[in-house]
Image: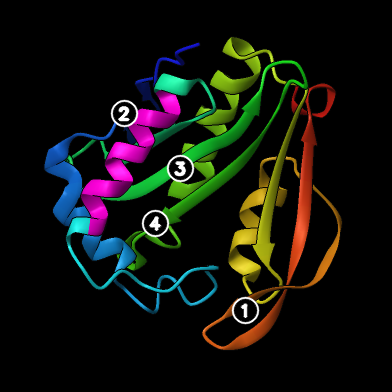
Amino acid sequence: MTLATPVLDTDRLRLRPFTDADADALFALHSDAHVLRYWDSPPWTEPARAQRFIRMCRKMADEGTGARVAIDRASDGAFVGWCGLTGWIPEYRSATLGYVLGEPMWGHGYATEAARALLRWAFDTLDLNRVQAETDTRNVASARVLEKIGFVREGTLREDCIVNGEVSDSWVFGLLRREWR
C-alpha cells in the first residue's frame, strides 16, 4: 500500500516530499554535531548518506509505513529541516512523530508549526488514533514543542540510548485523537 507523501502549507512553511536536490542541505543538517547532540545516531560523515536517506523516505512511502517531508520557509524557500511520521500501522491507527531542524531555525516556532500541520494531515487523512514521540530527557526544547501541540509525557525509557558515548534516558510522549481536537 503506497502512502502519498503530502504537500502541506502553513502560514510560514511548506512541507513537501524530498527531492534529490535536497541532498546538500540534508547532509549539512545531519552532519552538524551540535544539532544532533541528542540524536540516537552519530552525525553523518559522508555526503552519500543524504541520498540514502532520501531513498529511504521514498521507500517508506512506497511501502506505506510512513511519510517524511522536507520543511521550507515559505517566504524565501530556505530549507528549515524535516519532520515525519514513521512506523504507521493502519490496523493499529498509530505512528511515531519525529523532526530535525537546523540550528538557525530554532526558536522561531517552526517545529511546532510543521508538526501541527503534519499531525492535522495524519489525523484527518490517515485516521490515526495515537501518535507517539520520544525525546532525550536533556532536550527540553523538543519536549516543549511536543507539549505545545498537545502531547502528554507518559513515561521515561531508562538508559535506552547511548548518545555521544553517554548513556541517555528518553521521555515518551503520546497524543490521542480525542486530545487533538
- What residue would you read off at disc 4? 101
Q: Which mark sits nearer the N-terminus, 4 or 3?
A: 3
Instruction: Give the residues in magenta.
Output: 49-61
Name the element at disc 4: strand
Q: Which mark sits nearer the N-terminus, 3 or 1?
A: 3
The amino acid beneath tag 4 is Leu
109 up-or-down from 143: above or below: above
Residue at horizontal 37 percent and vertical 36 percent from the top: 57
Q: Is residue 165 left or right of residue 58?
A: right
Q: CA distance from mark 2 to mark 4?
A: 15 Å
71 up-or-down from 153: above or below: above
- What residue would you read off at disc 2? 16
**Could you say where residue 78 lies in the image, as x and y percent from the top left?**
19, 47
- What residue would you read off at disc 3? 83
The label on residue 162 is 1
Q: Nearer the viewer, mark 4 or mark 1?
A: 1
Q: Residue furthest right?
A: 155
Residue at horizontal 42 percent and vertical 74 percent from the top: 42
Name the element at disc 3: strand
Q: CA distance from mark 3 to mark 1?
A: 22 Å
The amino acid beneath tag 2 is Arg
Q: Nearer the viewer, mark 3 or mark 1?
A: 1
Residue at horizontal 44 percent and vertical 30 percent from the top: 60
